Image (cartoon, rainbow, N blue to C red):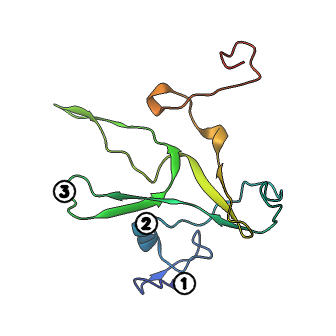
Amino acid sequence: MATCAYCKGYFYEHGREGLSMCEGCGTRVGVIPMPPASRPPNPCARCSGRKFVRCIPREHTSATGGEMNAQHTNPMFLTHAAEAHHGWVLNHVKELDARKGFGMLEVYACWNCGAVEWHCLDVRNIPIHPDLMTQLIDYDDTESPYR
């Protein structure tokens, strides 16, 4: 067991390896265990530097609904899927859960010149659909209007 550096509560480190905060505090500030890196070990395209700072960028949003003055912070994704709520009387689309998305983003900043590269961790798992505002463009496709 470890002690959370923020709330001082105890937590099991399983699944939180390397983090000094419990899952509750991590959820509040949008911190998750780092997924594996996706950038190939190539030098910086701008200066040929070989040292980078890797970061999972986080999105900060204001509260909605009844949560006055609350803010939410979550890892950034390329898109999110909407879910429908089917009630007895009223059907509606639920608010998006910013923690559940497709295409988690990561950023690499060159330690030498500061150039920034964006990468998507799970690009092949992003569903392609107009409702998600996603489109697959294949420049090698002979039927493509972009050829």
Q: Secondary structure at mark 2?
A: helix
Q: Residue at x 79, y 58 (%)?
A: 44
Q: Is residue 116 above or below residue 125?
A: below
Residue matched to label 3: 66
Residue matched to label 1: 1
Q: Which numbered disc, 2 or 3, marks the residue that appears first in the sequence?
A: 2
Percent coordinates x, y for residue 6 in the rendering: 43, 83
Q: Residue at x 46, y 70 (%)?
A: 26
The span from disc 2 to disc 3 (Cα, nearest Å) is 19 Å
Quadrant of the drawing holding the N terminus: bottom right
The span from disc 3 to disc 1 (Cα, nearest Å) is 35 Å
The span from disc 2 to disc 1 (Cα, nearest Å) is 19 Å
Amino acid at pointer 3:
Gly
Percent coordinates x, y for residue 50 in the rendering: 82, 66
Residue matched to label 2: 27
Near mark 2 (Cα within 10 A), the count class, few <14, some 14-19 or many ≥20, is some
Q: In the rendered view, does 48 fall on the left or right side of 19?
A: right
Q: Residue at x 70, y 25 (%)?
A: 138
Near mark 3 (Cα within 10 A), the count class, few <14, some 14-19 or many ≥20, is few
Q: Secondary structure at mark 3?
A: loop
Percent coordinates x, y for residue 80 in the rendering: 46, 42
Near mark 1 (Cα within 10 A), the count class, few <14, some 14-19 or many ≥20, is few
Percent coordinates x, y for residue 140 in the rendering: 77, 22
Q: Is residue 21 above or below residue 62?
A: below
Q: Which numbered disc, 3 or 1, marks the residue that appears first in the sequence?
A: 1
